[in-house]
């Protein structure tokens, strides 16, 4: 195992991911999956509008001063962009813009890649997850919820017949 491997943290993230998936399949999908496409996508995008929380990685004292400022900046700004794209998606879906669905695609692809990149950077560049300080809940709880939500958005976007439902 690499020296940066932290079994309790990995198990915490894996548990949050598994639990998020089970809750989504059991409770969220039956409702969201039955909603009209634009409404379901808008609801799921609303959850991502809170991703400005990633900016806290750049707040002095929220994380350890030893946490890489490059990592903190990339995570923070990537999340802020994702939150902005989520808000734009919500507006486009609410106002039924003709480009609403392509905007949701942009938001969802960006948001997913941003989270996966943050996990990759965290695993390869952060030797101690304790450096996240108060922000430890973000990768350990919030990110798994967000990733599962992205999967739900992709499922709706790729669902056959959802174009007819949108019309």
Image (spheres, rainbow, N blue to C red):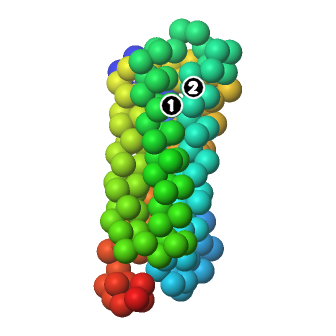
- Give the residue at x 45% y 42%: 81
Could you say where residue 82 lies in the image, as x and y percent from the top left?
46, 46
Could you say where residue 157 lies in the image, as x and y percent from the top left?
36, 72
Could you say where residue 33 lies in the image, as x and y percent from the top left?
51, 80
Which quadrant: the N terminus?
top left
Viewer-nearest residue: 49 or 5: 49
Which quadrant: the C terminus?
bottom left
Viewer-nearest residue: 162 or 20: 162
Residue holding disc 1: 76
Q: Within 10 angstroms of label 2, few (less than 14), some, or many (20 or more) residues?
A: many
Viewer-nearest residue: 159 or 163: 163
- Give the residue at x 53% y 64%: 91
Which type of secondary structure does the marked residue at label 1 adopt? Answer: helix
- The answer to whether the residue labelled 2 contacts the one labelled 1, judged by CB atoms less than 8 Å apart, is yes
Q: Is residue 118 visible?
A: yes
Viewer-nearest residue: 62 or 76: 76
Q: Is residue 4 visible?
A: no
Residue holding disc 2: 57
């Amino acid at each position: 195992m690499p020296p940066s491997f932290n079994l309790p943290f990995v198990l915490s993230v894996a548990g949050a991911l598994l639990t998020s998936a089970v809750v989504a399949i059991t409770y969220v999908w039956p409702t969201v999956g039955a909603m009209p496409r634009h409404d379901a996508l808008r609801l799921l995008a609303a959850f991502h509008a809170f991703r400005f929380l990633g900016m806290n990685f750049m707040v002095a004292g929220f994380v350890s001063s030893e946490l890489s400022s490059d990592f903190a900046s990339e995570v923070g700004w990537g999340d802020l962009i994702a939150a902005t794209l989520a808000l734009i998606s919500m507006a486009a879906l609410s106002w039924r813009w003709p480009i609403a669905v392509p905007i949701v695609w942009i938001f969802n692809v960006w948001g997913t890649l941003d989270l996966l990149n943050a996990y990759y950077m965290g695993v390869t560049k952060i030797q101690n997850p304790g450096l996240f300080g108060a922000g430890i809940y973000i990768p350990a709880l919030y990110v798994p919820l967000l990733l599962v939500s992205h999967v739900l958005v992709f499922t709706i976007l790729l669902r056959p017949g959802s174009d007819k439902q949108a019309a």
